Every structure is written in structure tokens, then in C-alpha cells.
């Protein structure tokens, strides 16, 4: 053999020896890993044969369950150390899921694994001493080289800590929910308590303002100050309550396709007077084709009115407000409200959406709560939109909102829309109609008495509690009823339901007049069956228009004229 051949053989032997060494090292390492796994105390490893009898019970299983391996190997199956009711429930759930009868026991635990699906489930382990703890168990089928199931491997971990955290979290959520409910009830109650005295202040101030003889110039200035401060306080109450509802997640929105042109026309009508007083011109867009956005109609209008009011209030004298609508590349529509005011610095823009921050306008003659823009932002976001602002000092500001466009069209407006009934006054009736007012607050009763005194077509009856109101209604059969909600004895809602269930009085329309003015209070009242729900403080025009509407309905019942014609 040549020297070269001898070296080649030696190299081959050396390489073979090296490979063998590495293989041995790999086997040792694998063995060490397997030993580490099997002797780990952090999780249980249980292996069974194909019948479910335990063949392997590692150190972790011994530590967790309190059994020694010799006590369970070849003697029991894993279902014997699980909560039997949970095993039964699992078998029933699998039976329903797969439409196949599943026998409770190990078969229920191993069913999915036997079909090649690794299964992970939560069950309660029962220890040797009878104690229990929640566990997460993973079960896998073990197969031979021919694919035949020869056993099952169950790896379990103690789930006690996570369960304790879940329980603590659920308890905390329950406490928070209870606190939210208490907060909501407190806000509703506080709203009522604040509105009740404010109702008297604003109501009588309006009576003085519009009474005969007319107030003197000095009295008129005083009344104007009372009304201005009163309505401002009412706005503040409303906005604080609205903001609290949003923050607590209690504000409900009804998203639907809203026709932008209609909302714009309504907003134009509502801000026209405010703009005229300041000499501000307001330009609204023209729509070539119907454009619908997904929004809550009332809240969208609230958002736009707030932006328009701010654009008018903080504009220059005889300035301009321009409203535009443009499509965005992302498939939204951007509604922009641009003014010619003083504009905002970057610092002020950063502070815009902070509650009660009026950006130094406190000394301004224009009143404001500092909550409007915060409310606007929250409402826009709740409707799935975004809000932004662009401004330049000395040039003006542009606030914009982007809303989701929808192609779905609204159903045609109901031809019986009762709003049309507010447009004309009912002629004086020679035979006065009867109104029953159920109210326990003397100031509120006096205010309504003074209002009804201006109506020769009405005569007023009154009751101080719900039971008396029911008795008077059955005895006198008034044409309609005004009902307070918070009454001594029984509530106004209960009284209304009693009247609606009596054949003698069920035809009488009942109008709620209450200081419970939270949105959920109004919804609850209308769902209960009130014909209308008016809130205190009384707005005299709205109150009189509601009386007109109910009078029309009462007249329609007496005359052979279709109700539809009477209303329209």
C-alpha cells in the first residue's frame, strides 16, 4: 500500500470516529433532555397505553397530584383523577358537537387526540388527599411506525394562578359595573334635582318676559340676564351629563344612513338667528346627488351645530363661515366648517379637546362651557369618524370631521310626521278642552297654571299625586293629561300604565313632563307609552306646540275627519 493510500484510510477512520463521537454526544444530549423533561417538577407528564391505562407518571405529576408513580401505573386512567362532572360535561359537549355518542371517562378526554387532533382543555385535577386545582391539559395520540395508536401523552400545568387572576378580574369588573350603575343613577338623580329649581327660574322668567304689560326696559335687562344665565346653566348640566354618559359607556347611538342635505338644511335653520345677530354670513354646500353617511342623526346634528356655533361665536364681526363637503381617497366624506376668526396657535390647538379648557376665552363676552369640543370628538369617534382642525393665526380656523359613506338609502319619511302639526295654532274652541296636570311641586304647578291661563280654549285640573290623578282622570275624563314622573306614592309611569289599561281612560293621551331628562329616562318613558316626553325646565314654545298637537288629536276624535288630515 502506498503512503498516500495509507493516509486516506487513516483520514476516513478519523472522520468516522469523529462522526461517532458526535452521534454519541447527540444521544447523550437527547437523553439528558428527555431525563430533564421527565423529571421536571413544573408540569405533569402522564403517558397511557391505547386503552387509557397509565404507563408513565413523572415527578411533576407526583408533586402536583400527591400520588407516587407505583400507585397509579397499570392501575387507573387519567379520567379517574379528573372531576367526574366535568368529564361528563365534556362527553356531552363532544356528543352534541360531533353528533356521536361519547362515553364519559378517558374516551371523552382522548376522543379528538385519537383522530389526530391535538386537544387542549381545562379540567380540575383531584389530588390523592382530595384537594383540587384547575389545570390546562394537552393530550396527543402516540403512534407506532404503522400509524396505529399505541397510547396517549397528557401534559398538564397548574392553572390556579391564572384562575385566581380571572376571578379577581371578574370581581373587579363586577365592582366597576356596580359603580357605573350607581354613577348613572346618581347622574339621573342629580339631573332631576338640578333641573327642578331651574325649571321654576326659567319658567317664571319667560312668563315675565312675555307677559302683559310688557316689562320696563330695566326689568327687561334683568330678565334677560336671568334667562341667559339660566339657559347657560342648563347647557352646562346637559353637557356634563352627556360627557359622563359617554365616559361610562352608557350613551347609546343608533347608526343609520343619514341624508346629509337634510341635516345641513336643519342645521342652517337652527343657527340662522345666531349668525344674523353677529352679522355672520354662513354658506352651506349644494349636493348634486343624494349623499348618505352612517351616523346617529341626532348626534350628527349636535356635532355640526356645535362646530357651527363655535365658528360664529369666535368669528370676526361680519365674518364668514363656509361649510364644504369633499370625498376623501379612503372612501369617507369630509365635512369642513371654516371661519374667518382670529385663528389658533399650535399651543392652543394642542389644548383644544381638554374638558373645561376655553383657551383663554373666559373673559370673552361669549359664554361657553369648555365641554362642547370634547363632546364633539367623543361623538364623532363613537360614530366611527375622526375629527381634526387646521388653523392659521389671523386667518381663521377650519374644523373637519370625516364620516363613513353609505349607499343604503333611508326609507321615505312617514307622512304622519307629527312635526308638521307644530306649524299652525289651533283656533280657539268655544267649548274649552280639559287638561289634567299631575304634579307635586307647587312652583311647577303654578307655572303651568299661568301658561294655561293664556289659553282660553283650555281649562286646567290638577292633582298632587299619582293615585289622585287616576281618580280625577276617571271621574272627569279629561281630553289629555300632563304627568310628572317622580310623584308621591306611585310614579308617573305606573299611573300612566294604570290609565292605559282601564277601558274608561285608555284613549286619553298622556304627556310626560319631568326633570328626569337623561336620554335613557326619555327612552324609558316613550317605551312605557307616553304620547310625548317633555323635559323641565319648560320651554314655553315647545310646551304650547305640544298642547296644540294634542288638541288637534282630541278634536279629530270628535269630528268626522280622518286623523291624518287633522294632524297635517
Image: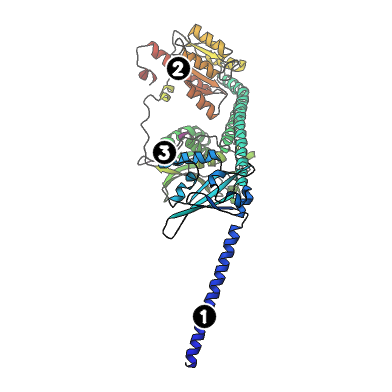
Q: Is residue 3 left or right of residue 558?
A: right
What is the C-alpha distance between the residues marked 1 and 2? 106 Å
Q: Is residue 64 magenta?
A: no
Q: Are marks 1 and 2 in contact (CB under 8 Å)?
A: no
The location of residue 446, given as percent across then percent down, is 59, 15
Residue 537 occupies quadrant: top right
In the picture as drawn, the residue positioned furthest to the bottom comes out as 2
**Given this view, does label 3 or label 1 mark the residue nearer the observer?**
1
The disc at residue 15 is 1
Q: Upstream in the sequence, badge 1 or badge 2?
A: 1
Q: Upstream in the sequence, badge 3 or badge 2?
A: 3
Q: Is residue 525 left or right of residue 286?
A: right
**Given this view, does label 1 or label 2 mark the residue nearer the observer?**
1
State the extent of the magenta-drawn residues as a range: 285-298
Q: Nearer the viewer, residue 488 or 294?
A: 488
Q: Is residue 293 magenta?
A: yes
What is the C-alpha distance between the residues marked 3 and 2? 31 Å
What is the C-alpha distance between the residues marked 3 and 1? 83 Å
The disc at residue 260 is 3
Disc 2, SS: helix
Disc 3, SS: helix
Q: Is residue 325 left or right of residue 376?
A: left
Q: Residue at x 44, y 15 (%)?
A: 551
The location of residue 163, given as percent across then percent down, is 60, 44
Location of residue 10 with respect to 272 vertically, above or below: below
Category of crowding for the residue at label 1, using alpha-carbon neighbours closer than 10 angstroms: few (below 14), some (14–19), many (at least 20): few
The location of residue 28, given as percent across then percent down, is 57, 68
The disc at residue 43 is none
Q: Where is the C terminus found, in terms of image quarters?
A: top left
Q: Nearer the viewer, residue 166 or 286?
A: 166
The disc at residue 550 is 2
The location of residue 326, given as percent across then percent down, is 42, 46
Amino acid at each position: 500500500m502506498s503512503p498516500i493510500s495509507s493516509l486516506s484510510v487513516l483520514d476516513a477512520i478519523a472522520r468516522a470516529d469523529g462522526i461517532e463521537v458526535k452521534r454519541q454526544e447527540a444521544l447523550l444530549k437527547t437523553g439528558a433532555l428527555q431525563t430533564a423533561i421527565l423529571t421536571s417538577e413544573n408540569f405533569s407528564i402522564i403517558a397511557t397505553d391505547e386503552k387509557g391505562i397509565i404507563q408513565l407518571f413523572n415527578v411533576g405529576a407526583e408533586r402536583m397530584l400527591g400520588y407516587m408513580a407505583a400507585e397509579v401505573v397499570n392501575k387507573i386512567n387519567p379520567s379517574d383523577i379528573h372531576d367526574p362532572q366535568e368529564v361528563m360535561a365534556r362527553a356531552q359537549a363532544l356528543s352534541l358537537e360531533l353528533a356521536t355518542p361519547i362515553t364519559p371517562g378517558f374516551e371523552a378526554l382522548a376522543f379528538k387526540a385519537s383522530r389526530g387532533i391535538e386537544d387542549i382543555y381545562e379540567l380540575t385535577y383531584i389530588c390523592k388527599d382530595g384537594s383540587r386545582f384547575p389545570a390546562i391539559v394537552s393530550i396527543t395520540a402516540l403512534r407506532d411506525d404503522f400509524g396505529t395508536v399505541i397510547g396517549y401523552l397528557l401534559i398538564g400545568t397548574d392553572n390556579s394562578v391564572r384562575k385566581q387572576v380571572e376571578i379577581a378580574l371578574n370581581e373587579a369588573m363586577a365592582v366597576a359595573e356596580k359603580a357605573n350603575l350607581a354613577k348613572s343613577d346618581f347622574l339621573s338623580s342629580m339631573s332631576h334635582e338640578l333641573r327642578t329649581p331651574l325649571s321654576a327660574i326659567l319658567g317664571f322668567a319667560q312668563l315675565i318676559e312675555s307677559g302683559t304689560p310688557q316689562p320696563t326696559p330695566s326689568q327687561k335687562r334683568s330678565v334677560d340676564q336671568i334667562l341667559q344665565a339660566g339657559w347657560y346653566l342648563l347647557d352646562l348640566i346637559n353637557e356634563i351629563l352627556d360627557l359622563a354618559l359617554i365616559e361610562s359607556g352608557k350613551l347609546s347611538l343608533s347608526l343609520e344612513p343619514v341624508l346629509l342635505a337634510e341635516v345641513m338644511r336643519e342645521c342652517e335653520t337652527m343657527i340662522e338667528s345666531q349668525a344674523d345677530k353677529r352679522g355672520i354670513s354662513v354658506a352651506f354646500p349644494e349636493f348634486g346627488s343624494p349623499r348618505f353617511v352612517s351616523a346617529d342623526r341626532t348626534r350628527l346634528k349636535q356635532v355640526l351645530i356645535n362646530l357651527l356655533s363655535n365658528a360664529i361665536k369666535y368669528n370676526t364681526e361680519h365674518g364668514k363661515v363656509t361649510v364644504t363637503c369633499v370625498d376623501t381617497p379612503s372612501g369617507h366624506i369630509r365635512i369642513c366648517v371654516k371661519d374667518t376668526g382670529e385663528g389658533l396657535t399650535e399651543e392652543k390647538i394642542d389644548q383644544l379637546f381638554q374638558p373645561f379648557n376655553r383657551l383663554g376665552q373666559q373673559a370673552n363676552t361669549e359664554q361657553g362651557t369648555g365641554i362642547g369640543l370634547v363632546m364633539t370628538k367623543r361623538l364623532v369617534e363613537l360614530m366611527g369618524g375622526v375629527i381634526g382642525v387646521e388653523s392659521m393665526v389671523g386667518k381663521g380656523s377650519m374644523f373637519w370631521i370625516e364620516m363613513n359613506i353609505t349607499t343604503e338609502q333611508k326609507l321615505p319619511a312617514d307622512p304622519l310626521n307629527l312635526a308638521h302639526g307644530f306649524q299652525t295654532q289651533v283656533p280657539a274652541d268655544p267649548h274649552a278642552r280639559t287638561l289634567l296636570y299631575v304634579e307635586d311641586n307647587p312652583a311647577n304647578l303654578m307655572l303651568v297654571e299661568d301658561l294655561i291661563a293664556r289659553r282660553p280654549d283650555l281649562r286646567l285640573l290638577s292633582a298632587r299625586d299619582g293615585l289622585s290623578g287616576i281618580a280625577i282622570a276617571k271621574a272627569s275624563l279629561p281630553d289629555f293629561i300632563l304627568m310628572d314622573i317622580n310623584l308621591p306614592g306611585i310614579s308617573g309611569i305606573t299611573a300612566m300604565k294604570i290609565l292605559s289599561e282601564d277601558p274608561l281612560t285608555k284613549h286619553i293621551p298622556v304627556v310626560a313632563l319631568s326633570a328626569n331628562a337623561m336620554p335613557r329616562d326619555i327612552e324609558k318613558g316613550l317605551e312605557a307609552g307616553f304620547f310625548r316626553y317633555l323635559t323641565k325646565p319648560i320651554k314655553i314654545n315647545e310646551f304650547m306646540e305640544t298642547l296644540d298637537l294634542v288638541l288637534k288629536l282630541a278634536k279629530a276624535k270628535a269630528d268626522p275627519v280622518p286623523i291624518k288630515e287633522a294632524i297635517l
